[in-house]
Image (cartoon, rainbow, N blue to C red):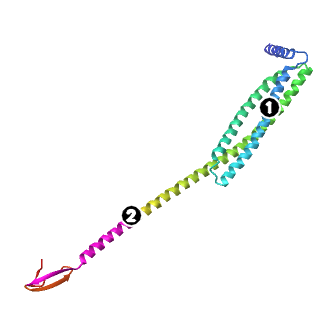
Amino acid sequence: MKTLKNNLVVVVILSVMLSSTASANPLNDLIKGHLNEATKLIDLFNKSSDETDSLSARVQNAIDGKNAGVYSELRSLTETLNQRFKDNGITLVKLQGLKDSDCALALADTSKSAESLEAIDTCYELRDALGAATDARGATAQGLDLLNNTLSKYVALLEGLDAAKAKAAEEKAAAEEKKVQEEKAAAEAKAAAAKAAAAKAAATKKTTITCIKGKLTKKVTAVKPKCPTGYKVKK
């Protein structure tokens, strides 16, 4: 009884769709619309696959040349392709669902009318197109895996370059600081040597004094001059 009721529902739906005009086939037109979307989807996946391969080559060239200047651009393009792949995948799932539901109506029509057969043929075309879209999606997925892996290697390279650059800057700063300290130490040593030399010169400098004894006068020159016995320093 339930099966009979379901069949009656299908018949009513088909009757409404097929009886709008004498020559119209709205169910087939609906399925053809899905077919057109599926065909466009194949082109979109194939285009994404080509762009993915091209972008992978660009990223590899950037790695080989250690070129950090194009990272932002390549990352943005990669994110765009990943998002487009996700969006197209959602569309593919939607079309598969529409194919299942709308083609179920077409296959349920056993009248073998021209309209019915046309809709069924279009369903087979849609099935094949969705199969091709699925294959194209798989090829694109493989390309994206390669692209994302290559981009990860690019990121690792850039991180290594940044680390090397930071280390070089640190070593340069350390060398400059060492030079400053060495120059400071040399200046201090030079000043100390000059001070010691001045002290030594002062300690060994000879002076002359005049000594007197009555009417006698005698000059004495020495580091620490002293008057002979009996003489006194003339003031």
Amino acid type, residue under disc 1 in the picture: Ala
The span picked out in magenta is 184-213
Mark 1 lies on residue: 38
Does 99 appear in magenta?
A: no
- Tell me where residue 90 appears, x and y as whole percent: 72, 31
Give SS at disc 2: helix
Q: Which residue is under mark 2?
A: 184
Q: Is residue 110 above or below residue 227?
A: above
Q: Viewer-nearest of labels 2 and 1?
A: 2
- Count of marks, rendered view: 2
Dot 1, how many residues are within 10 Å of its Cα: few (below 14), some (14-19), or many (20+)?
Answer: many
Badge 1 marks a residue whose secondary structure is helix
Q: Position of residue 97 (x, y in %)?
A: 76, 27
Is label 2 in contact with label 1 (beta carbons under 8 Å)? no
Residue 61 at x, y = what percent? 69, 52
Q: Is residue 188 above or below residue 79?
A: below
Residue drawn at 67 percent across, 48 percent down = 150
- Vertical arrangement, residue 193 with respect to residue 176, above or below: below
Of all residues, the one furthest to the bottom in this rendering is 216
Choose the circle earlier in sequence order: 2 or 1. 1
Three-letter amino acid code at the position of disc 2: Lys
Q: CA distance from mark 2 to mark 1?
A: 78 Å
Label annotation for residue 61: none
Q: Is residue 159 left or right of 52 when viewed as pictured?
A: left
Image quadrant in which the C terminus is located: bottom left
Most prominent secondary structure in the magenta stretch? helix
In the image, taking residue 34 as reference, residue 114 lies left or right, namely right
